[in-house]
Image (cartoon, rainbow, N blue to C red):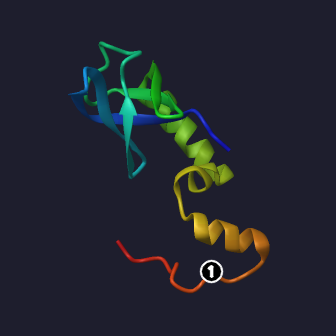
Amino acid sequence: MCLAVPGRVVEIREEDDTRMGKVDFGGVIKDVCLAYLPDLQVGEYTIVHVGFALQRLDEESAMQSLELYRQLGALEEEFGDHWGIAARQAGERRPPGTEETPQ
């Protein structure tokens, strides 16, 4: 599944003449293209789909969406433990060498 997920902009930079940034999705930080939102600022929330920030979002709406995605398990599916998810879906144990490492 590929969701349009809200995240908070934590860094903005230029990369190869393209406005890029780091966006925090509840603890998972990803590089995102910010070209479609040239006035987006650090600390603001945005909806991101396939690596592109598409729309500014207020914090309350972002938090509500993130909580709903958490309840549905969609954030783990989108960002999380892919080996663990696959093993659970198959009713199996994790493959050797893919154990989670504490952070």
Where residue 32 appears, x then y in whole percent? 39, 34
Give the residue drawn at x 61%, y 37%.
Answer: 3
Q: Residue at x 57, y 32 (%)?
A: 4
Name the element at disc 1: loop
In the image shown, does 46 or 95 lie closer to the viewer?
Answer: 95
Observer-nearest of 89 and 66 = 89
Question: Seen in the image, is 94 located left or right of residue 44?
Answer: right
Residue 102 placement (x, y as % from top left) = 38, 76
Q: How many marks?
A: 1
Foreground residue among 72 and 100: 100
User: Is 78 situated above or below 61?
Assistant: below
Position of residue 40 relative to residue 90, above or below, is above
Provide the residue designation for mark 1. 94
User: Residue 82: horizontal and vertical position, in percent?
Assistant: 59, 63
Q: Amino acid at mark 1?
A: Arg
Judge the density around disc 1: few (<14), some (14-19), many (≥20) Cα neighbours within 10 Å.
some
Q: x and y percent of residue 33 in the render?
A: 38, 28
